[in-house]
Image: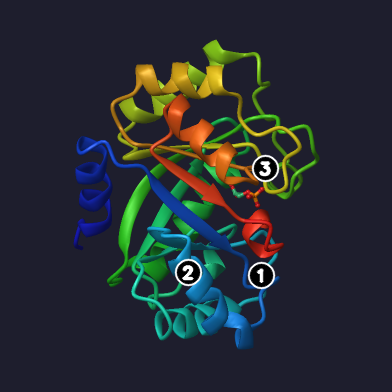
Amino acid sequence: MSKSILNFIQTAIKKGDKLLAILLDPDKTSLKDIPAISKRIEKLKANFVFVGGSSIQKGITEIFVKSLKNNTELPVILFPGDYSQITNYADGILFLSLLSGRNPEYLIEQQIKAVPFLKNTSLEIIPTGYILIDGGTNSSVLKISNTKPITQTNIKLAVNTAVAGEYKGKQLIYLEAGSGAKNPVNSKLIAKVKQQISIPLIVGGGIKTKQQIQAVFSSGADIVVVGNAFENKTL
Ligand code: 1GP
């Protein structure tokens, strides 16, 4: 399995570069729009396309990723809400563990169910510690995982969860306020987590404008993920 995505991220960070990922949900994006969407993504100078969602029908992700790969040179990375969204047509997969939650389904069960789909895969598997922070909305991650997010003020718990993730061998930490969050992850929390980990930090959820993206980068995020704002064409 190649490590080119992770190497690219690590090299970019060493150079002080910041990276942008656009999240596409195959359930909300029509296949016929993919060529135009791909052009918009490249115009924004995004570095990756993440593909995932919480309620995608089986098989849809594969058709979607295939079409995306025909329209963009950017790495396509699966950000699956469920193991059934795995397809070998992508370049990599964020192999997520929901470390903020105490639901075994999202700590280990889904990962075990994913193994038969990943056994002979060409996907780059990227172990990722996924940490849900309260974004002020009842997000789909929250509903589906049936877990409690970490509050925006419990910085100590967020930091210790991220550091535990690094000790467990995760290669990335993802601070998630939830898709469509009212309150994106606050800058103090991002900065404190970044100070205490030595692996790359992804931040997403409720980030809508270029100014907000810059602020999240300045706080210490290495990769920012934008979904809704791209979909609604406000970015
Ligand atoms: C959700 O972090 C992502 O998993 C993106 O959130 O859709 O609010 O940009 P938004």
Whichever of labels 2 and 1 marks the residue nearer the N terminus, that label is: 1
Residue 59 appears in the picture as rendered: no
Q: Mark 2 belongs to which amino acid? A: Ile
- Camera-side residue: 13 or 115? 13
Reading the image, the residue beneath label 2 is 86
The answer to which quarter of the image holds residue 169 is top left
Label 2 – label 1 distance at C-alpha: 11 Å
Residue at the (61%, 24%) spot, across then down: 186
Left or right: 25 with respect to 180?
A: left
Residue at the (64%, 24%) spot, across then down: 150
Placement of 54 over or under 99, stated as above or below: below
Q: Mark 3 belongs to which amino acid? A: Gly
Rendering coords of residue 177 (x, y %): 64, 37
Reading the image, the residue beneath label 1 is 56
The answer to which quarter of the image holds residue 81 is bottom right
- Camera-side residue: 83 or 150? 150
Rendering coords of residue 59 (x, y %): 58, 81
Placement of 126 over or under 174, stated as above or below: below
Reading the image, the residue beneath label 3 is 206
Cβ of mark 1 under 8 Å from ligand 1: the answer is: no
